[in-house]
Image (tube, grey):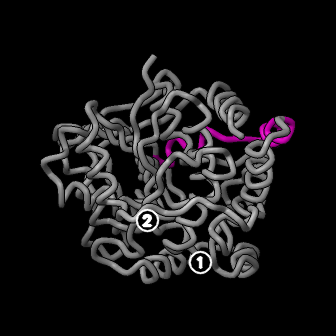
Amino acid sequence: MAKIPVIIDCDPGHDDMMALVLAYGSGKLDIRAVTTVAGNNTIENTTRNALNILHYIGADEVPVAMGYQDPIVRKHKDVIARLLASRRQQMSEEEERQQEKIQGAGVHGVSGMDGFAFPPDNPKRVEPLHSVEMMAKVLRESEEKVTIIPTGPLTNVGLLIRLYPELLPKIERISMMGGTSEFVLSRPYMEFNTAVDPEATKLVFESGVPITMFGYDVTYRVLYGRDTIVQMRALGNHAGTMVADLLEYFMEAHNSMAKRLQLDGVAPVHDACAVAGVIDPSLVTKSKRLRVDVETGGTYFDGATVCDYTGALGWPPNAEVVYNMDNERFLRLLVEAAGRCL
């Protein structure tokens, strides 16, 4: 069976790491490019992390292009400061101490992917093309439609839509990790990726391109546990060791900062869901076609994905919103993919 051509747009990130391992190790995807965006960390760090991951798992042939530091309209540092301030209002004293412990860098740590020391001599280098230009090049040169899988803020994808509207027919689907419909983590409708660049998110949802949204509604139901870490480490290869160390770090950091979710010995790998849904759509066990609008002018809810999940407005749906996946098969897919990597 022919591989599915994809572009992965990411901000590694522990969960982006798992998405890349799954995409490459599955053997089902033809990764035409990996493009990076600032989100979990600076663009320099997210790009370095992408290069390190791909080289370490044996995916040197996959080109990496660097994107923008700032969202389309806003400044990345200002958005992150606003999100952290909002989060602190709801933190307990213990959660604030954990925040200070990792120097305000969020659950992914100072490097954007703390928990594993990559070898310092990585020969893999970033491509000379900008991320948006790389995406346009891949679409333009492809004989088949290409699926775009964004697992970070939608800056690159939004700019692609704005700058190259003639290439939209070459996009098969956007399978994104982002947004939320009913699940509330901090404020209603808020999720990190969409909140970082609300204007880009709005461009994506108004593009007319088919969208599958893997938001918090599903990613906080599809959880890995310590048994998955043990299975990864037992693989005995580069990828298995790296994944085990990083997932172990992420579980502790995430759960320490999100005590109100009461996750005990389990944690989400958000971004891998959007990849898994492309590899095997039958993993999705519950979804609904909904109208999704994006707030860009509000005081509290910029970047909110406002989903009409009751159909009250009667407007045509523009996205498939995923609510559940087969957790057992999903985790098995992750371990098998890591086992096929270097």
Crowd class of label 2 (few under 14; some 14 to 19; many from 20; radius 10 Å): many
Which residue type carries mark 2? Met
Q: Main secondary structure of the magenta part?
A: helix
Residue visible at 76% across and 79% down in the picture: 101
- Of the pair 311 and 116, the residue shown nearer to us: 116
Nearer the camera: disc 1 or disc 2: 2
The image's mark for residue 66 is 2
Which span of residues is magenta-colored?
Answer: 215-234
Question: CB atoms at circles 1 and 2 under 8 Å apart?
Answer: no
- Of the pair 181 and 208, the residue shown nearer to us: 208
Image coordinates of residue 26 in percent, x first then y, are: 59, 30
For this orientation, the residue located farthest to the top is 1
| Res 310 seen here | no
Crowd class of label 1 (few under 14; some 14 to 19; many from 20; radius 10 Å): some
Give the CA separation, mark 1 to mark 2: 31 Å
For this orientation, the residue located farthest to the front is 123
Label 1: which secondary element = helix
Which residue type carries mark 1? Arg
Count of picture labels: 2
Residue visible at 57% across and 45% down in the picture: 19
Image coordinates of residue 237 in percent, x first then y, are: 80, 40
Is residue 150 placed above or below 71 in the rendered structure?
above
Image coordinates of residue 278 in percent, x first then y, are: 45, 32
**Of the residues under marks 1 and 2, which one precedes in the sequence?**
2
The image's mark for residue 218 is none
Which residue position is annotated with label 1?
88
Q: In the rendered structure, does residue 78 fall within the stretch colored magenta?
A: no
Label 2: which secondary element = strand
Q: In the rendered structure, does residue 217 fall within the stretch colored magenta?
A: yes
| Res 58 seen here | yes
